[in-house]
Amino acid sequence: MRKCNNMKKSIILWICLQVFGPGSIAQSFSKMMKPKPAIVSYTFRNQFAKDMPGTLDYIKSLGIDNIEFSNLFGQVAEDIRVMIDRRGIRCTSFGVSYDDIIQKRSSVIENAKKLGASYVRVAWVPHTEPWNIETAKKTAAVFNEIGKDLKSHGLVFAYHNHGYEFEPYQKATLFDVLVEETNPEYVSFEIDILWVQHPGQDPAKLIKKYPKRFKLMHVKDLKKGIVGDLSGKTPTENDVTVGTGQIDIKKVMKAAKRSSIEHFYIEDENDNSWNQVPLSIAFLKNGK
């Protein structure tokens, strides 16, 4: 009878794995978030520039095995891939400049594939004047073309908001125009929650508004008392340990659970990020 019961349990486990996949029964990172936090290379940009192997070792020691490279730091993609593979780290997203995705796209695609990334992300559209409706619609058209091309190479294009897109327009913002004018088959979004909060928006509400368009997140926090604007700029010291700033992180993560966001990259631009990131991970784990 005991053998029969064990066999039944094995069959049930096998069925769960087949229907839901291994992730369905895997333990969540915390009550706040299911996947483990990942990290953006820009967080440790100074350390990466001096010692990439040592910086990767530190990242691994934090329990992080997922990275978004936003720079190659003078290395070649093949060598970086070897270094991360040796450490059991994967690159899921590759951040590039707008100019590079326009002018050096073949190189971008090649590097993304060599790194093993699924996403190619752009975080800033060059501009000298505040965004207007013409700019938003023109940018959307360009993004649709980029995304269609990347999709033909097995990659997903994602745009990372940076604050200036939230210029008011009618009863919404130009970010809404950008989302509505882009084709979901070709364009996804990476929500940077600081750059939603800084221009006076609510990141949790934005996720709820577009739950299927956001695929990636930059997890960060904005210093209390800072009054933002639409410039897309703030001193790096205004990046603080997650959970200590003005963003309601728990509310954001609750909304994210009901979205299509796959990867949660900690981004900390503060010069003290080396010491702040472990505390941010602890907050995401324990909620305090």
Image (cartoon, rainbow, N blue to C red):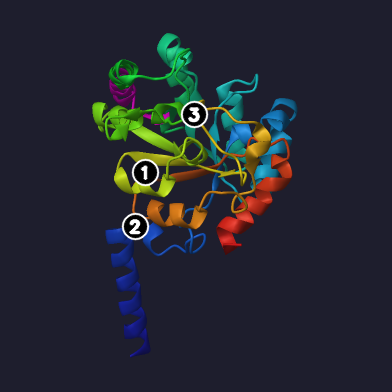
Query: Which circle's residue, 1 or 2, is located before the other in the chain?
Result: 2
Whole-angstrom CA distance, mark 3 to mark 1, is 24 Å
Q: Quadrant of residue 58?
A: top right
Whole-angstrom CA distance, mark 3 to mark 2, is 26 Å
Q: Residue at x 60, y 33 (%)?
A: 41
Q: Position of residue 185 (x, y in %)?
A: 25, 31
**Image quarter of the C terminus:** bottom right
Q: Position of residue 161 (x, y in %)?
A: 44, 31
Q: Position of residue 222 (x, y in %)?
A: 58, 43
Q: Position of residue 152 (x, y in %)?
A: 29, 23
In the image, taking residue 113 as reference, residue 182 lies left or right, namely: left
Q: Answer yes or no: is residue 125 visible.
A: yes
- Image: magenta residue range: 144-159
Residue density around tag 1, few if under 14, some if 14–19, many if 20 or more, within 10 Å: some
Camera-near label (3 vs 1) is 1
Residue 211 painted magenta: no
Q: Which residue is mark 2?
A: 21
Counting every numbered tag in the picture gives: 3
| Up/down of 36 relative to 109, above or below | below
Q: Which amino acid type corresponds to the residue marked 2 in the rendered image?
A: Gly
| Up/down of 188 relative to 147, above or below | below
Q: Which residue is mark 1?
A: 206
| Up/down of 79 relative to 66, above or below | above
Q: Which amino acid type corresponds to the residue marked 1 in the rendered image?
A: Leu
Residue density around tag 3, few if under 14, some if 14–19, many if 20 or more, within 10 Å: many
Q: Secondary structure at mark 1?
A: helix
Disc on res. 242: none
- Labels 3 & 1 near each other (Cβ < 8 A): no
- Labels 1 & 2 near each other (Cβ < 8 A): no
Q: Which residue is mark 3?
A: 94
Q: Quadrant of residue 110?
A: top left
Foreground: 216 or 69?
Answer: 216
